[in-house]
Image: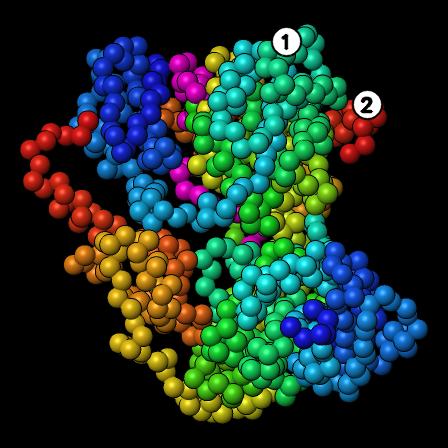
Amino acid sequence: MSAGPRISVIIPTHNRVESLLRTISAFERQRFELQDMELIVVADGCTDTTTSTLERRTTPLDWKLVVLDGLGAGAARNAGAEAATGSLLLFMDDDIEPAPQLVEAHVRAHAESPGRVVMGPYPPSLRGRSAFFRMQARSWWQSHFYEMSKPGHRFTYIDLVSGNLSIGPEVFRKVGGFDGSIPGAGGEDYEFGVRIIEAGIEIHFEPGAAALHHEHETMTLDGSFRRARQEGRTNVAIGRKHPRLRRGLFWDMLESEEAPRPQLRYLVFRRPALGRILAAMARASLPVLELLKMRHRWRKAFGALFGYWRCRGVADELGSEAALSAYLERSPAASPSTGEDELVLDLAEGLDVAERLLDASRPRSVYLRYGEHDVGRIEPAAVAEPLKGAHLRPILAERFPWELLRVLALREAALVEPRSTHGPVI
Amino acid sequence: MATKIVQMELKEPTLDTEGLEGYDTMLVLLRYGGRPVGQLRVPVVGGRVSAAEVCDRISGTDQWPIWKRVVQEFVAWEPEDAYPGRPRASVVVITRERPEDLTRCLNGLMALPDDGQEVIVVDNRPQTDATVRVVSGYGDGVRYVREDVPGSSAARNRGLREARNEVVAFIDDDAVPDPGWLRGLVRNFRDPRVLAVTGLVMPLELETPAQEEFETYSPHGRGFHRQTFSAATHYALHVAPIGVSANMALRGDIIEVVGAFDEALGVGTPARCGEDYELFTRILRAGYDIVYDPAALAWHRHRRSWPELRHVLRGYGVGVYAAWTRLLLLEREPSVVVMAARWFRHKQLPDIIAALRREPDSPPLDVQLEQLWGCFLGPLAYLRSRRRLRRLGVTS
């Protein structure tokens, strides 16, 4: 172990001094030896009083300030990691307030199994009833963290959010850190996730490393549309870097919205003027729908707008529909990957045996059989962690219920047949 | 005119098909590995049912809940039970002057597997010491709390405040829990979006025409499929399909998140009921989820006499309209009016016409008119109930 502190907390910030101070105070109250912790604030393009306030403030923490010129969240995290001397890096967003046991929980999770990436939950702090937009955002975040906390969850790059994430400095350097060329904030963590998973690094979700996200102070309805546009741009940036993901990235991004995809594409690329008018009308309708408590129509309008702005972000980068088609064409189709690392599992030998086999070989895809009967195939997923034993039962129950019933019925029939002289069961 | 209620385990299917004199129907609750998976009705002829008929009806039921259990047992995995450990619960029984029902309910609660739960009996504005005497028979196992503000809503709020555990499960004194009841409710609270869980309610007995009619006209059960309700997937004001407070659980800190039960609603207030209904809409409108899980089974004894049935159904009318009055006036939900119109147009009016035409299987006219009259009284009842609360010095 190096002589440095055990953990370096890196907080990139951009003009949010009040929020930042709350985050720093929460680190001063950690249930963890403060002398084992170092704090690095990366002030990225701050034009408010962030730097002067921090310089005046006294803190028991050993801390450093790095000042940047507005290079974006990814570049700011890299600069923080550069300045860090700890044997663990903890990235924390400036509007997130860690619970007192957060640092301890991150450190413990790394001690259990070194070399992994650890994420903790940070659901929105605002509870109860509020604006439709806030309730929808809260539900999204809660669902995101809940899904990851399920035993047997198979991580994909989309799971990776960097607001409360820790990683060893060697691992961070090995994957090349965040992509500093992606400007602004929004989506750069997904790109990091792609490289984490491709490097075969384990992702671990630690419910104990909990924090609260004061999102309602920093995110507005229009802010979320700006972010959607940014995500659209980042989506193309990731696709340029990882061409084989292009199609999946593009469709995944639009699929999550309720708006019909071809219409969005048509509006954004072929009828941009009409698109702008419709978007302005949809935006103006949101407060009216909310006032009338028309939840479903509001949700539809919001979903369409969100998809529209993501599509606009894509158009910002690619310009024309021809360029979009060319961009998507140049994405090799998802690797058929027959053979090679595909594992054949016979469920008739028992699920425990199958789980052990999965743990031993960590394949990308699996062919499932039950004795001589076929059950199905777990297809290789784009940028998902390799399969392991814990994934098996949830996948079987959720994706193959009918196939399993069929083979179970065939098995029963084979068992019962010789004794079919019995009368009715009752 | 009575229905015999029996249960059948599909893994070892046996059924007593004889000795059913005095019954004209048999209601069979189907279980698979103990889990409720379906129900069926079989006619009783000459004091017996035919086994072939039972088999036939089983193949006619919705079998997906059964097959789902078969798969889950083979895989030995169920999403709700996949987590190690489970949250602890406080069980709250709301009661008022029903010592016999309460004893049966508490006996059922004492027979539940011990997961560290506590049991609290909230005695609402008692007139005698009957409840105290019943509770004292259970020693330290049951805590007695007296709430003098009248109303099941006030009693439930008291239960929420007295409870010490993360989840608060409510069961009515005229209901009996199944052994899997509490676990079936509690397991759904892993998801942070879930603020409430309701369970399956089956009739404890169907011995009188009033009980039969209640079970047909206004059953408490909501089927054998687990369902998640949210404002994203369901109409947030139409919460009747979610379930009833006779069998439900809430997250312990619900008062801080969406507020307490409205004490102007509920049994024992002029509004007669509706406190659960109103809270469910508030949960959905605040962007949280409610789960209906048939694994949580409770048996409910419906009112036995016809006057009691009429009284209860009028109460439903009053309660629903009282809750809607709050939604319209206090919560400014204009679509309540549309919903009321739809209910009348698509359910109440056709039912009344069917009864007037004496169509077979149409609900009796007197019961329907009673409920409609209740709807008419609802809005004023709610306003009166609020005035009464203010007089009692309760701030809502």
Q: Chain of mark 2?
A: B
| Above or below, comparing residue A14 to residue B8 in the picture | below
**Residue B144 is covered by the magenta coloring:** no
Q: Is residue B265 visible?
A: no
Residue A132 image-quadrant placement: bottom right
Give the residue type at disc 1. Arg
Q: Residues within 10 Å of mark 1 (few under 14, many from 20)?
A: few
As helix, strand or loop, the secondary structure at mark 2 comes to helix
| Above or below, comparing residue A353 to residue B148 in the picture | below
**Residue B210 is covered by the magenta coloring:** yes
Q: Quadrant of the N terminus of chain B?
A: top left
Instruction: Point out the stretch of residues depicted in magenta.
Output: B204-232
Q: Nearer the viewer, residue B307 or B199?
A: B199
Percent across and percent down for residue B23 are: 31, 14
Kindly identify which residue carries mark 2: B392
Q: Nearer the viewer, residue B325 or A305?
A: A305
Residue at image coords 36%, 26%:
B361
**Which comes before the other along the chain, label 2 or label 1?**
1
Q: Is residue B82 visible?
A: yes
Q: Is residue B338 left or right of residue A98?
A: left
Give the residue type at disc 2. Leu
Percent across and percent down for residue B345 are: 51, 39
Mark number, residue B133: 1
Q: Is residue A202 left or right of residue A279?
A: left
Q: Chain of mark 1?
A: B
Percent across and percent down for residue B270 are: 69, 23
